[in-house]
Image (cartoon, rainbow, N blue to C red):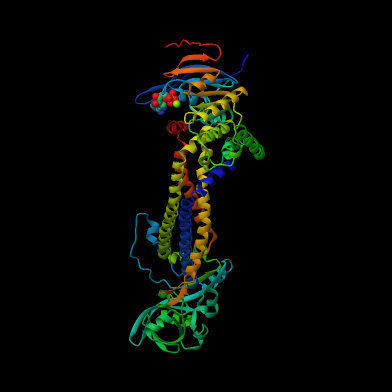
Amino acid sequence: MNLIFNIAWTHVSTRVRQTLVGMAGVSMGVGFTIMMAGLMQGSQLDFLRQLVDTMPHITVEDERRSVPTQPAEQEYAAVQMSDIANVGKRPGIKYPESAMSSLRSWIPGDVAPSAKTTAIINHGGARIGITLSGIDPRREVQVSKLTSQMREGKLDDLSRAPNGIIMGEALAEKLGVKTGNTVLLIGGQGVQLNSTVAGLYRSGLKRVDESQIYSLMGPAQVMMGQSGVVNQLRLRLNDPMSAQKVAAQVEAQTGYKSVSWQEANADLLSSFTVRDFIVLTVMGAMLLTSSFATYNIISTITHEKRQDIAIMKSLGMREYAVRRIFIIEAAIIGVVGILFGWILGYLLCFGWSKITIFNPLTGSTVPLQIYYSLTHYLIAGGISLVCCAGAAYFPARKATSVHPVEIIRGAS
Amino acid sequence: MTEIALQAVELVRRIEGAVSHTLVNGIDLAVNKGEFVAITGPSGSGKSSLLYLLGLLDAPSEGEVMICGQPTSKLSESDRADVRLTKCGFVFQFHFLLPEFTSLDNVLLPMRAAGTMAESEMRERGLALLGSLGLAEHANKRPNALSGGQRQRVAIARALANRPEIIVADEPTGALDTASTEQVFSILRDIADQGQTVVVVTHDPALAARADRRIHIVDGKIAEITERGGGELVCEVAS
Ligand SMILES: Nc1ncnc2c1ncn2[C@@H]1O[C@H](COP(=O)(O)OP(=O)(O)O)[C@@H](O)[C@H]1O
Ligand SMILES: [Mg+2]
């Protein structure tokens, strides 16, 4: 083994330039891969964090996931009913208080009620459709980050102003209203309500900021024309990633449609998957190409060393032992290249994290989010090492499988 | 009763191809331990091919090579490599030294590959071998700093490294000047006199004359065997 390492070392150390090119190839592949992984996962996690902070982790709605089966369907298998209006069904979750206390007893998190409806906000000739959620400020703090997202005013101010509402800064800007102004809300049943802007928030998610308005439960229920109704429970979990599982359990227990944040954002998340796939493919290709220089140098060495290979085999060295010389050469190039690639990757990530970009979602300038993960380094290094070993294996196998007699005859 | 170190039994080596070609065509030969055998013959008569078979570098199409009484035709490629490593030493017309290594390291190569000795023991033996071949002061030189004769002697030292039973040499002096040729001759003679078996292919009648036995090959067959001292012994070859 010592001998083999010795020969391998001699081969690479007498070809400084080629060896350095090989190492540089590996370094760049590994470095850029780490950078891409850090940037990609960083931006993704940043986005998810915003999403998870802003949205309820699970929303329980006062509807069933499937249309209730009709008596005729239960009676006759061949009957199919469609276009049946669900008449006479009172909206809202039944006994919301007991449902909530039952949920609180087992979910790892908290739950708050809300009354959600749609309305039109009318101000100075502008009419904009919005979602109005009536909330309970004391409980809201348990389930949302709304408190920390407040830019002006506080949640408690909802009860101080007459029919107080809190709207997103983006919407306020669009309407040209300020805290303390009055706007007119028009509900689906034609109910009209003069409301005072009690505060402004900014979640960072544009579609939320431009359309989501909060009030106390009372005004929202008035807008719906249903006093006392709670048509939505919002859950916040200690572990947002468990939302899908918990949502299924909640749905099974309550019978109400329970939507996890993942389900609500399935389109976004699936676009992430596509993005992940593309980026992973690019990174894999990068690592593969970065080992081409290694392939090149090992091919050259095995070609130049045909006679040495022949004599080592004729002296009685086993073929695999001779082959291992060249694998070790690639490993030397690979390992040194990977070490420098790690340093390069770290420096690139560090450099990017100093760069600030304008984020159109939040409308602010923020540093690029980089995710530092040991896994990135290990995976990039591991794949690179395998690529190098592969790059060496094929030329080495070809060169060492030649029968020594062929070379020896040719040389003498 | 003299011990037989190397024996060939009805040895045949054929190249199968579009045109089949018989390189070695039924050779029977027994070489005693410590014997010095010279193989002569016209160019292209199959001398090298025979030597590769005797040194287990190549496998016969038919027949058997026995090394110290052990048949070898059933051995796998890697088992044959093991036998070569410990029992056969090769010297070729070209020295085939590893260019990046010193003389000493080249001589150490087979010992290191065998891995049976301690490093200090190997170095001691390597230096002793180089010394005995008059290369003591060249131990730390690379091949390109040596003359042709010196390189060939390093190659002989390498062949001797693992104390093989058999040394096979294919025209070892083919590329050397007269003085170096003479040096290499006497080294090979000494090796045989010390009990190792030497089979050498040569064009040089002077070297052949110093062998214990000369085997003349024509068209892959033994045409004539000459014993030293005991006049000419013409071998009838069945055709
Ligand atoms: N692989 C091969 N294919 C075809 N012919 C070969 C091959 N190897 C050697 N020969 C031929 O076999 C003959 C014997 O070769 P060789 O044993 O090298 O002879 P010598 O060493 O006596 O000159 C030569 O004519 C050579 O050209
Ligand atoms: Mg020849």
> Residue A392's x, y, as percent?
47, 45
Residue farthest along the front direction in this orientation: B179
> Residue B211's x, y, as percent?
54, 20
Residue found 35% across the figure and 24% down from its top: B19
Residue B75 versus residue A220 in the image, above or below: above
> Residue A135's x, y, as percent?
49, 78
> Residue A299's x, y, as percent?
44, 44
Q: From the viewer's perspective, tell me whether residue B121 is left or right of residue A212.
A: right
Quadrant housing the C terminus of chain B: top left
Would residue B15 be seen by someone viewing this image from the given angle? no
Name the foreground residue: A199 vs A204. A204
Residue A20 versus residue A227 in the image, above or below: above
Ligand 2 shows up in the quarter that is top left
Would residue B156 be seen by someone viewing this image from the given angle? yes
Q: Quadrant of residue B85?
A: top right
Quadrant housing the N terminus of chain B: top right
Name the foreground residue: A238 vs B205. B205
Name the foreground residue: A105 vs A313. A313
Residue A230 versus residue A340 in the image, above or below: below
